[in-house]
Image (cartoon, helix red, strand yellow):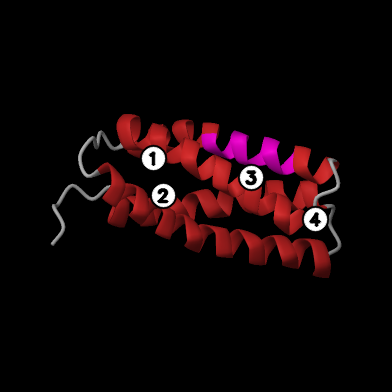
Amino acid sequence: MQFFLYCLCGGMGVSTDYIVFYLSVMSGIWYQGANSLGYLAGTLVSFSLNRIFTFGMRDRVLQRLALFLTVASVGFAASALLLWWLVEVINLDARIAKLITLPMVVALQFFLNRRITFNAAPSG
């Protein structure tokens, strides 16, 4: 059930990510720059929704945001690398390549966020 909620809330983040990415690419921004803009926008939307609805965490917001952004940086690195490979090596259109990277990055980040960011145990 938690993964379903994560996907639902994360779906809003992923949608935000892709919309910002798509519009940025269509306006002439380099695909990796567009990936950065979309990823940041989607990450902030995803954090806000998942913190409350998926994991029910209302404490330590700034600490959890810092952890979420750390996890997001791992996801972003994976996204950028996969996107580069699909665009530069496989020669896919960047808009299609971005769609292919999304499910892999969502699964990676769910695992990391559940274990690190939204772990109920108090830190330190």
Q: Are marks 4 and 1 in contact (CB under 8 Å)?
A: no
Q: Is residue 81 left or right of residue 121?
A: right
Residue ID for mark 2: 110
Query: Depth check: 13 or 82 in front?
Result: 13
Q: How far is the residue under mark 2 from the one under mark 3? A: 18 Å
Query: How dense is the environment of label 4, judged by Cα within 10 Å: few (below 14), some, or many (20 and up)?
Result: few
Q: How far is the residue under mark 4 from the one under mark 3? A: 12 Å
Q: How far is the residue under mark 3 from the one under mark 1? A: 22 Å
Query: How dense is the environment of label 3, judged by Cα within 10 Å: few (below 14), some, or many (20 and up)?
Result: many
- Say which amino acid is labelled 3: Gly
Say if 55 sits above or below 25 in the image.
above
Query: Depth check: 58 or 14 in front?
Result: 58
Q: Secondary structure at mark 1?
A: helix
Residue ID for mark 1: 3
Residue ID for mark 3: 38
Tell me, yes or no, if residue 1 can be seen here: no
Magenta stretch bounds: 13-22
Say which label, 2 or 4, has the lower sequence index.
4
Indicate the position of residue 122 as horizontal and vertical percent values.
13, 52
Say which label, 2 or 3, has the lower sequence index.
3
Residue ID for mark 4: 30
Residue found at x 61% / y 34%: 15
